[in-house]
Amino acid sequence: MVFGGTSGYERTGKTCAQREAGSFRGSEGGNHTNKSTVWARVRKYAQEHVEGPKDKTATGEGGSESESGGAQHNRSLTLRFVEELTLLFKAGQRAQSMSDKERNAHTYIGSALGALGIDLATL
């Protein structure tokens, strides 16, 4: 398949397979067993070139890393409330026996989820 449009590939007559072989030619002698690693780096460098380097202090949460492999995520406060309160509510449902304080807290957790628009019957 030949690329259409006004790309250089159409003028030179390169096919997709030829383009792909040329893109990964530099990775053959390197330490890359997965060719997509090289292509991912190319995309990352191109994105940084277009947008400029990312400022790590402007992540919204002070650059804190979550438990998911060091990835940085900006979660809204509502989403954080829903996730954490849902975990607590489900733990209260699974509990075999609860004290009066724990039962009251479980009731308030359910009320808080209801105020956030979560239907407790779906949990």
Image (tube, rainbow, N blue to C red):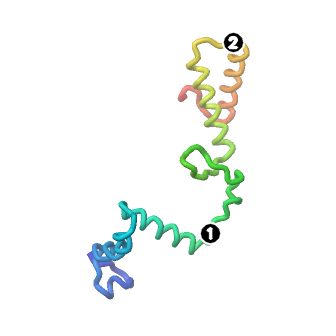
Q: Is residue 88 above or below residue 97?
A: below
Amino acid type indicated by mark 1: Pro
Residue 39 % position (x, y): 42, 67
Q: Residues within 10 Å of mark 2 (few under 14, many from 20)?
A: few
Q: Residues within 10 Å of mark 1 (few under 14, many from 20)?
A: few
Amino acid type indicated by mark 2: Ser
Secondary structure category for the residue under label 1: loop
**Which residue is denoted by mark 2 in the rendering?**
99
Measured in 3D between alpha carbons, the distance from the residue under mark 1 to the one under mark 2, in whole angstroms, is 53 Å
Q: Of label 1 and label 2, which has the lower sequence position?
A: 1
Q: Residue at x 57, y 50 (%)?
A: 70
Query: Which residue is most to the left?
Result: 1
Asked if the residue under mark 2 is in contact with the one under mark 1, i.e. CB atoms within 8 Å, the reply is: no
* Quadrant in the rendering for residue 59: bottom right
**Which residue is denoted by mark 1 in the rendering?**
53
Residue 112 % position (x, y): 69, 30
Residue 85 — which label?
A: none
Secondary structure category for the residue under label 2: loop
Q: Is residue 57 above or below residue 95?
A: below
